[in-house]
């Protein structure tokens, strides 16, 4: 496998397929790992070689989700090589992606969210963190969307936020009063303190005055959860899941939640109805006299 072909595939995913940066990077890692395993030229890879590789991943303890992603990656890669006439046949043609059991996403209760958002406001960094967390919970945007926000994406007058989601689809999301208040304070009073010599227009900055990364945000939310004594498993996506679930619990319709989250397919949003149903079951067991 030649690096040039991987680079061409990367450009194809970016320009033609409009895949996200994170997906493209994951696919590239998968291909590099595949390259280190195979001993043949890519034009001579057979279906048996693929099966052997997938078996090796399983032996190494890779999760079903990871193996499914690898299969998707290799399917896309060999489809691309066929289009480019780099291979005569597709060894992935008869290899199916296993259906994964959908697990319910982790969410926080409303009380836990309130505890998480009670950030002690001490300096520019704490005001930034408060604005980020309030904004994330108020809008349900993805963490990748959050860290890529620019100053021009926040409209204080209309209390809205503009973001670019998957597939380069733009959407406008309303901001709640709390999020609007702390975003305004952060932008007006504290963001200028984080700027260094090199100006940039990204909304949320790190201690070097550069754009905050997803990894940087992950560290912040993990540290804040520890301070708030939240014991649940937490990821940067948890507030997005909590946003959708709490909206549903309070009577929002599924179509509206789909629009706010930027889901292209309503079936993706329907996972939150299962979470809501689980909440109802727990409430029934706790409060009904014969619930147990």
Image (tube, grey):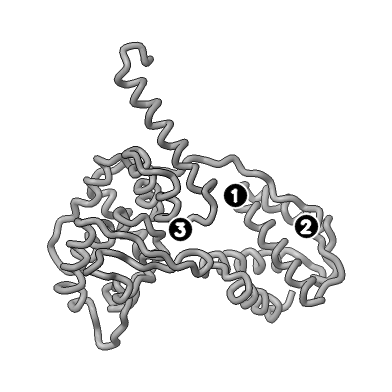
Q: In the figure, 56 relative to 198: above or below? A: above
Q: Position of residue 107 (x, y in %)?
A: 38, 43
Residue found 63% across the figure and 56% down from its top? 69
Dot 3 or dot 1: first in sequence order is 1
Q: Residue at x 67, y 53 (%)?
A: 57
Return the mark for residue 50. Answer: 2
Marks 3 and 2, the one that precedes in the sequence: 2
Q: Going by the image, does 114 lie left or right of 82? A: left
Residue for point 24% across, 80% down: 195
On screen, residue 235 above or below 273: below
**Residue tagged 3:** 262
- Answer above or below: position of 175 versus 62: below
Between residue 280 and residue 32, name the one nearer to us: 280
Q: Secondary structure at mark 3?
A: loop
Q: Is residue 277 above or below residue 103?
A: above
- Residue carrying label 1: 65
x and y percentages locating residue 180 in the rendered image: 21, 62
Query: CA–CA distance between discs 3 and 2?
Result: 35 Å
Q: Secondary structure at mark 2?
A: helix
The residue carrying pointer 2 sits among few (fewer than 14), some (14 to 19) or many (20 or more) residues within 10 Å by Cα, namely some
Pair 3/1: label in front: 3
């Amino acid at each position: 496998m030649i690096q040039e072909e991987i680079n061409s595939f990367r450009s194809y995913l970016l320009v033609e397929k409009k895949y996200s940066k994170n997906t493209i990077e994951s696919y590239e890692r998968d291909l590099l790992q595949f390259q280190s395993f195979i001993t043949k030229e890519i034009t001579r890879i057979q279906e048996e070689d693929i099966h052997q590789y997938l078996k090796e991943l399983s032996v190494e303890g890779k999760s079903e989700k990871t193996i499914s992603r690898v299969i998707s990656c290799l399917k896309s890669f060999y489809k691309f090589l066929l289009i480019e006439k780099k291979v005569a046949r597709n060894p992935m043609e008869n290899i199916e992606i296993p259906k994964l059991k959908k697990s319910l996403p982790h969410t926080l209760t409303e009380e836990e969210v309130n505890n998480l958002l009670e950030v002690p406001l001490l300096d520019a960094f704490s005001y930034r963190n408060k604005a980020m967390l309030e904004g994330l919970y108020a809008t349900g945007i993805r963490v990748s969307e959050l860290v890529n926000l620019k100053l021009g994406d926040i409209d204080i007058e209309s209390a809205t936020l503009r973001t670019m989601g998957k597939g380069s689809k733009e959407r406008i999301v309303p901001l709640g009063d709390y999020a609007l208040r702390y975003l305004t304070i952060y932008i007006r009073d504290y963001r200028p303190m984080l700027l260094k010599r090199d100006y940039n227009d990204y909304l949320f900055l790190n201690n070097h005055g550069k754009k905050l990364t997803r990894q940087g945000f992950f560290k912040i939310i993990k540290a804040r959860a520890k301070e708030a004594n939240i014991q649940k498993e937490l990821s940067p996506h948890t507030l997005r899941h909590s946003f959708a679930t709490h909206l549903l619990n309070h009577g929002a319709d599924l179509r509206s939640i789909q629009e706010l989250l930027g889901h292209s397919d309503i079936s993706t949003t329907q996972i939150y109805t299962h979470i809501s149903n689980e909440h109802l079951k727990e409430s029934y067991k706790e409060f009904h006299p014969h619930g147990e």
